[in-house]
Image (spheres, helix red, strand yellow):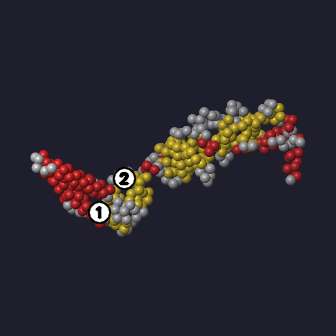
Amino acid sequence: MKTHRIHLILLAALLSPTAYAAGEMAINATQKQTLGIVSAPLPPRQHGELAGMPAQVVIPGNQLFTVSTPLAAMIEQTLVGVGDSVRKGQVLATLQSPALAEAQRGLLQAYTQAQLAKDYLTRDQKLWQDGIIAESRYRATQSQYREASAALAERKQLLKLSGMSDKAIAELQNGNSLNSTLSVTSPIDGVILEKTASTGQRLDAAVPLYKVARLDPLGLEIQAPLASTRGLKIGATVTIPAYGATGKLTAIGRSLSGSNQTILLRAIISKGADALRPGQYLEATLDTSSSDADQWNVPNGALARIEGKTLLFIETEKGFRAAEVTVLHEGAQDTLITGKLTGMEKIAVQGVSSLKAQMMGIGGE
């Protein structure tokens, strides 16, 4: 407590309100040494980057697929596991489904009805053209044929959704051979991320079996403070220095998260994605060189905050003057700023609290 009072008395003696001259605080070399004020040249201009931004690797939504059971079935055999690479159309599992046999029987019935309706239409068309039957009967037969054709198309579509190919459906129509074995295939070239069922398990329709994803390119979700997003533009380069991966910024969020008041930035990593893993947490660097404003990376101790403003103290011939700056990104040790600076200034990097005290009038009456 005694030491604190001595320090205030010293401030009062060295820095009085009369020390202001043209917006400057007059401080000589002896006073600087006594108060522990140290100056250093303003660091070189930055090329414009935000380093050490927390991020998480994600899979872009259009590259992630869920493979489900098309019909109620029992899993007869699973052919791939988590981590396996698969090709589009590759069989992932075989199922036994009585519902598939029922759907095939429905197709054969619909096919028979459609063929019969077609024969009736051909006959009645000829009779109508010869004037033997009325036009209304011909139109009725024509309507029946269209209904039978629609029913057949519906049955075919159901079997396609069940995993049967057009060739298999055509063979079924020609051979009338029912089959309850159902093959589940991969919709893309990718990697198995999840397997949620096992051999012998009985499942209802639309129950997930696998999650398949294409892992190149990968996405990145970056949590950035609001002030750090100034000057950012879509298309800015994003790098992950620890893994040598690079990509582009694709989206800048429009709202703040409720918990930590940050903005979500999204990027696509197109180079070096093979070194990353979905769900991985890491640090990313964003290029802000497209911003028109000059930027400098200064020590955190060089900044003073007074009444909501962030200030640097610039050395002059008579002492120091305060210059307002804008914080772009605040790190653990350094802060990226922009402001009306030439780049040739010397700034106070130690003893800033004494200069701040002078500005706030400590040491006056």
> Quarter of the image containing the C terminus?
top right
For the residue marked with disc 1, what is the amino acid?
Leu
Res. 159 image quadrant? bottom left
Residue at image point 67% right, 43% down: 335
Between 267 and 149, the one lying in front of the other is: 149
**Circle 1 residues within 10 Å: few <14, some 14–19, many ≥20:** many
Q: CA distance from mark 2 to mark 1?
A: 20 Å
Left or right: where does residue 58 sit relative to residue 165?
right
Q: Is residue 108 above or below residue 40?
A: below
* Residue 91 position within the rendered picture, expressed as x and y whole percent measured from the top left: 33, 57
* Residue 210 position within the rendered picture, expressed as x and y whole percent measured from the top left: 40, 59
* Residue 344 position within the rendered picture, expressed as x and y whole percent measured from the top left: 70, 31
Between 283 and 96, the one lying in front of the other is: 96
Between 298 and 228, the one lying in front of the other is: 228
SS for callout 2? loop
Q: Is residue 122 visible?
A: no
For the residue marked with disc 2, what is the amino acid?
Pro
Q: Which mark is residue 187?
A: 2
* Residue 39 position within the rendered picture, expressed as x and y whole percent measured from the top left: 76, 38
Query: What is the total number of numbered labels drawn onto the structure image?
Result: 2
Q: Is residue 20 above or below residue 59?
A: above
- Residue mark closest to the camera, 2 vs 1: 1
Left or right: where does residue 188 sit relative to residue 252?
left
Residue at image point 24% right, 62% down: 105
Q: Which mark is residue 100?
A: 1
Q: Which mark is residue 217?
A: none
Residue at image point 59% right, 38% down: 231
